[in-house]
Every structure is written in structure tokens, then in C-alpha cells.
Image (cartoon, rainbow, N blue to C red):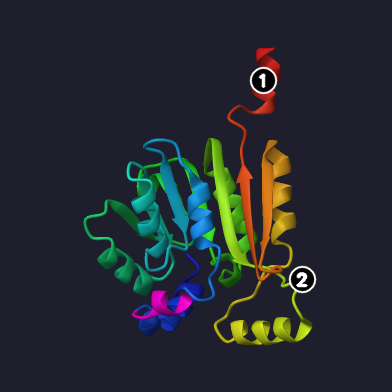
Amino acid sequence: MDVRHGDLMDSIYRHQRHFYDATRKYYLIGRDQLIEALAPPRQGTVLEIGCGTGRNLLAVRRRYKEARLFGLDISEEMLITARGNSAGKHIIYAKADAAAFDPQDLFGQASFDRIFISYALSMIPSWQAVLAAANRMLAPGGELHIVDFGQQESLPLIFRSALRSWLARFHVKPRAYLREVVEQLARQDGASVEFVAIKGGYAWRLALKRPRFQPEASCKAA
């Protein structure tokens, strides 16, 4: 586990976790649209990487009542809040480094029907390794959904500069090559990618969708 990053996240959220959801709802846009797009199969497995306070998984529970839900975070402070908020909601939480964990050991699951990451990659130094790991854990026909800060490509430069400076105070760095990395992962497995720029690129939303059958298997069957 990346102990230093975990310690940093705990130091940031030790106090912020108490008012995190009340403040973030104004600028972490696109989360509810991501949840609406998840549409897991009945009793499907859904994992959130960087689950924080559990806010998103609780929204998933309300919308998809039969789904089996799992949350992962490197901050024990955030998980304290998540577990408290989710009492009785049948959501399983675990602490781990998102770039290096065994889902079978943590959750008793080798793969997931849906994995989503909401505004976490911009805070994870090894974000590309996290995406690669998440992609490997998708079940056939599984989907990886992401929403995070974009490059504000259609917004005024002065706004972009001010936003970047403000985000840096919280150790947040928008990933300029997020779309390219997701598309590269998709090509490896014959998956498709959907991309949406929100509010002039203020945020990006992506969905990597794996085929239910691998191309190689289809060729052999033929």
C-alpha cells in the first residue's frame, strides 16, 4: 500500500469528512449522471474506487436496490464516515491502495459488472495503474465509468488558471491524458469508449464497455 499517500489523504480528510458532501456537491458535477448510466444487471456487482464518504454508493443503492455494492478507499478517515453513513445499507467497504489490491481477498469477488471512479484519479499519483487494474477486474460485458475534472478546453483561460491553482491546494491535478489512456486500454480488449465533456470541459465523463465475448473466443467458435 502507498502508505504516504494514505497518510496524506487522512490528513486532508480527518476534519473535512464531516462537511465534505455539503461542500463538494456544488462543483463535483456529473456524478449523478454517471450513476444513472451505470445500469448494472440485476444483482450485479458494483465497485467504487475512491468511495470517500459513501455518498455515491448510497445513491447507487437507492437507484439499484438489488445490486451488490463494494467501496474501496485508501483513507481510513473517509471510511469511518462511509461506514457510519451506510449502516444497514448492505455496502461492503475496505481500505486498500487502488493500484495494488486483490479483490478476491478484500471482497470475495474476482471481478465486477460495474466499476466507477468519481473525482479520485485526479488525486491518485499512480492513476494510470489504477485504471489498468480496474480494467482487469471487469467481468465480461462489464463497464468502467469515470467522471473527473477535464481540461476546461472550452472555458476562458483565466477561469482555467484560477481553477487549477485552487485545485492544487487540495492536491488535485486534472489528468490531461485521461481520455487517451482509457482509449488505449479499450483497444487492448476490443472494448468501446464513450466520452462526454461537461460544461465546456470543466469535467469529463467516460465509460469503457467491454464486450460480453472476447473477439478471440468468437473466432475460435466460428
Residue 126 visible from this viewpoint = no
Q: Residue 19: within the magenta? A: yes
User: From the viewer's perspective, is residue 96 above or below residue 6?
Assistant: above
Residue 19 occupies which quadrant of the picture? Answer: bottom left
Residue at left 37%, top 63%?
Answer: 54
Residue found farthest to the top = 222
What amino acid does circle 1 point to? Ser
Measured as percent of width and height from the top left, residue 206 is found at 63, 54
151 or 196: nearer the viewer:
196
Q: Residue 203: within the magenta? A: no
User: From the viewer's perspective, is residue 26 above or below residue 51?
Assistant: below
Disc on res. 128: none
Magenta highlight range: 18-24
Residue 68 occupies which quadrant of the picture? Answer: top left
Residue at left 75%, top 87%?
Answer: 158
Residue at left 64%, top 59%?
Answer: 128
* Left or right of 41 in this view: 151: right
Residue 115 visible from this viewpoint = yes
How many marks the image carries: the answer is 2
Q: Residues within 10 Å of mark 1 (few under 14, many from 20)?
A: few
Marks 1 and 2: which is nearer the front? 2
Q: Name the residue carrying label 2.
A: 153
Measured as percent of width and height from the top left, residue 62 is found at 34, 52
Mark 2, secondary structure of its residue? loop
Give the dominant element type of the magenta stretch: helix, strand or loop: helix
What amino acid does circle 2 point to? Glu
Q: Residues within 10 Å of mark 2 (few under 14, many from 20)?
A: some
Label 1 vs 2, first from the N-terminus: 2
Residues at marks 1 and 2, CA–CA distance in whole angstroms: 40 Å
Measured as percent of width and height from the top left, residue 51 is found at 43, 62
Mark 1, secondary structure of its residue? helix
Q: Name the residue carrying label 1.
A: 218
